Image (spheres, rainbow, N blue to C red):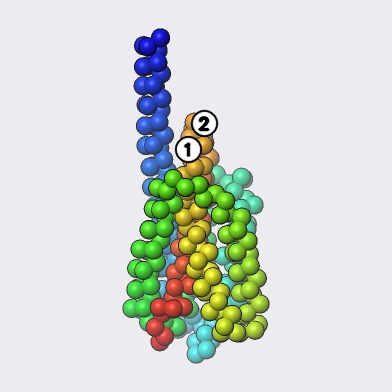
Amino acid sequence: MADYQTARAAGIGVRQAEIDQGLRAHMNKVYGTMSVGLLVTAGVAWAVGTSDALLSIFRDPITLAPNILGWIAMFLPLIMVFAFGAMINRLSAAGAQTFFYVFAAAMGLSIAWIFAAFTGISIAQTFLVTSIAFAGLSLWGYTTKKDISGWGSFLIMGVIGLIVASIINIFLGSPAIHFAISIIGLLIFAGLTAYDTQRIKVEYVQHAQHMDQEWLGKSAIMGALSLYINFINIFMFLLQFMGGRE
């Protein structure tokens, strides 16, 4: 009996070690895919935003007000997110990854105007602060023993409220509402960074025993998408406070 218990404990220990190793590989893929997506976004945004000829296709080069194509570029990433969620079950892991990088390029197009509105130094400084804050929030979400799954519904409701308020303020143009959106949005996406990190970790552990490689591959892409969106939003909200105007 003692030998059985020892063997069983050893087997559990080996299995747990395999899950831990798989989790590290899974998280590395999530962060790696997200990082490549950020590079794609930065490259597209810089290429378009620093070219008067390219930027003028989407916005007035003086006022930076969007034209028809500019409005399409602005809302295209949001449309793609919903489309991604609807299509994910029909996509292969490779297809999901390609879709993510196309989405990252579309996001770069939608925020390219920041290179005309803010100084390059302030953009770089804001990106650095965002990276540090994101890393701290994600690390806390990964290591905390506290169950923060209950945050999800409140944070998602907050995101929906932000989207509605942002659309309304496009027509109102209220600086006070814009300031409030930036503060509240910063807090919401900071919370989502920790929440999504823990969710990605927990979902992997729950599904690891099945070793469904197709699911694991697509799950890593979806996780990267979630964290990527959080990073971009934190960056954009911080830029409203830290960005030096051209």
Q: Residue at x 62, y 50 (%)?
A: 87
Mark 1 lies on residue: 205
SS under mark 2 = helix
| Marker disc for residue 210 | 2
Looking at this view, name the residue that lies furthest to the top: 1
Q: Is residue 4 left or right of residue 226?
A: left
Mark 2 → mark 1, Cα distance in angstroms: 10 Å
The quadrant of the rendering that contains the C terminus is bottom left
- Position of residue 154 measured from the top left corner of the image (x, y, whole percent): 60, 58
Looking at this view, name the residue that lies furthest to the bottom: 62
Q: Which residue is drawn at 51% across and 42% down?
A: 203
Instruction: Report the front residue among 137 and 87.
Output: 137
Q: Nearer the viewer, mark 2 or mark 1?
A: 1
Q: Which residue is drawn at 65% across and 84% down?
A: 172
**Rendered position, 13 above or below 176:** above
Instruction: Report the front residue among 173 and 74.
Output: 173
Instruction: Report the front residue among 126 and 185.
Output: 185
Rendering quarter of residue 157: bottom right
